[in-house]
Amino acid sequence: MNRLLINGGKALHGKIRISGSKNAVLPILAATLLTTDEVTVYNIPHLHDVTTLVSLLGEMGARVTVDERMSITVDSSTLVTFKAPYELVKTMRASILVLGPLVAHFGQANVSLPGGCAIGSRPVDMHIRGLEQLGARINVENGYICATADRLKGACIVMDTTTVTGTENLMMAACLAEGTTTLENAAREPEVLDLAKCLIGMGADIKGAGTDTITIEGTERLSGTEYRVLPDRIEAGTFLVAAAITGGRIRLKGICPEMIDAVIAKLREAGADITCGQDWVELDMEGRRPMAVDIKTSPYPGFPTDMQAQFTALNAVAEGASTISEAVFENRFMHVPEMNRMGAVIRLEGNTAFIRGVRRLVGAPVMATDLRASASLVLAGLVADGETGVDRIYHIDRGYECIEEKLAQLGADIRRISP
């Protein structure tokens, strides 16, 4: 099994370009099932999760073409099955995103209940209830969601809690429904807005994406389009923290600063000097140790849960004490015991971590438990004395494109070891 070996103590300096967003490209690839025309998607990150979804589309019979620049063209006119098998879906929760498009376009879907990171309960009941409100007939049998429908019909759907994939699934399904659909308490994340922009390019009538109320006027068919995926705001935030935690300086290219306002605000509070342009962000710590910052995660535009683990690493070596409260997922502190093995002083009480910063961590073998936890352990390794070995890095390959190459480009002593 591959692992990352990191020798800490080097401040990061340099420039990198941010990859396309994993959390935007997955629903957009699922949306290609809404039309029998070709859809070409650009700025695709080379990630395991993308490979999984491309494999799933191919397994169902779609013609998928990937070129050397990592653009992907999907032709769903050749679909031969509407089943998303457990063998593929178990590795990635985002596979549930094919459910809405399949039942809306083809009138049937047989999608395995999803797997993915073990970061707490993320039930699919809102996906199911929303599709039932649109007229789908759904049974859950032997671990599969079995859905059939004639043409879906618009409805007013009020989601109990804000859910990104639930919003995306129902928005896609509503595009081919008869009449008007309103999604209330919808997710406001930039990735939801990016999906809406792609769907509008395919001929959908969507208003309010990016707010908590989205209105969709259904149409009988959607057409093909070409679309460029937005940059990955979580990758951008992770690299900003990498520079801040090491006292370095970094310039990110190809990122819209407004998407990471909450992260930038906390980094400034930690003592970073940050300047922004239209499509770039530069952070300079000038060799300083970061100051501790308190964090509470919340849905966008609040502080993202996907950046909580990275700020746990920053606070572990920051000056002062801090608290981090996780209000989105109930089991997202699995990186804490591993950081404590490296000398961090972190105490957990329920969904809150109490952290007393230490000057240095100590290298140790650690094990990744989910995608963002793995990134946080890499960040901890960057400021640890001696060597840190991060195992189970298949998690990190799900969401970060060539992370060790980008970090090495910035001056980190990091390498991937194969067995």
Image (cartoon, rainbow, N blue to C red):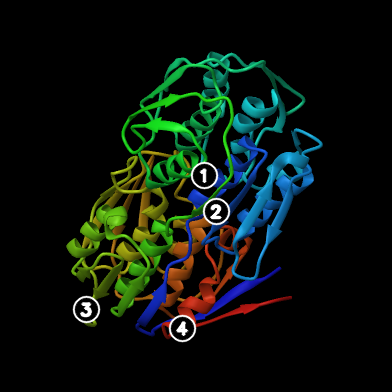
Decide which of tag 4 and tag 3 comes sooner along the chain.
Answer: 3
Instruction: From this view, report whether residue 52 is shown above or below residue 160.
Output: below
Q: Are marks 2 and 1 in contact (CB under 8 Å)?
A: yes
Which residue in the structure is indicated by mark 2? 370
- Element at label 3: loop
Q: Mark 4 Cα within 10 Å, few/some/many (few <14, many 20+)?
A: some
Q: CA distance from mark 4 to mark 2?
A: 25 Å
Which of these two is toward me, 73 or 358?
Answer: 73
Q: Mark 3 Cα within 10 Å, few/some/many (few <14, many 20+)?
A: some
Which residue in the structure is indicated by mark 4? 409
Q: CA distance from mark 1 to mark 3?
A: 33 Å
Q: Are marks 4 and 3 in contact (CB under 8 Å)?
A: no
Mark number displayed over residue 307: none
Q: Are marks 4 and 1 in contact (CB under 8 Å)?
A: no
Which of these two is toward me, 26 or 69?
Answer: 69
Which residue in the structure is indicated by mark 1? 119
Decide which of tag 1 and tag 3 comes sooner along the chain.
Answer: 1
Decide which of tag 2 and tag 1 comes sooner along the chain.
Answer: 1
Q: Quadrant of the C terminus?
A: bottom right
Q: Amino acid at mark 3?
A: Arg
Decide which of tag 4 and tag 2 comes sooner along the chain.
Answer: 2
Residue 226 percent across, percent down from the top left = 53, 52
Q: Amino acid at mark 1?
A: Ile
Which residue in the structure is indicated by mark 3? 288
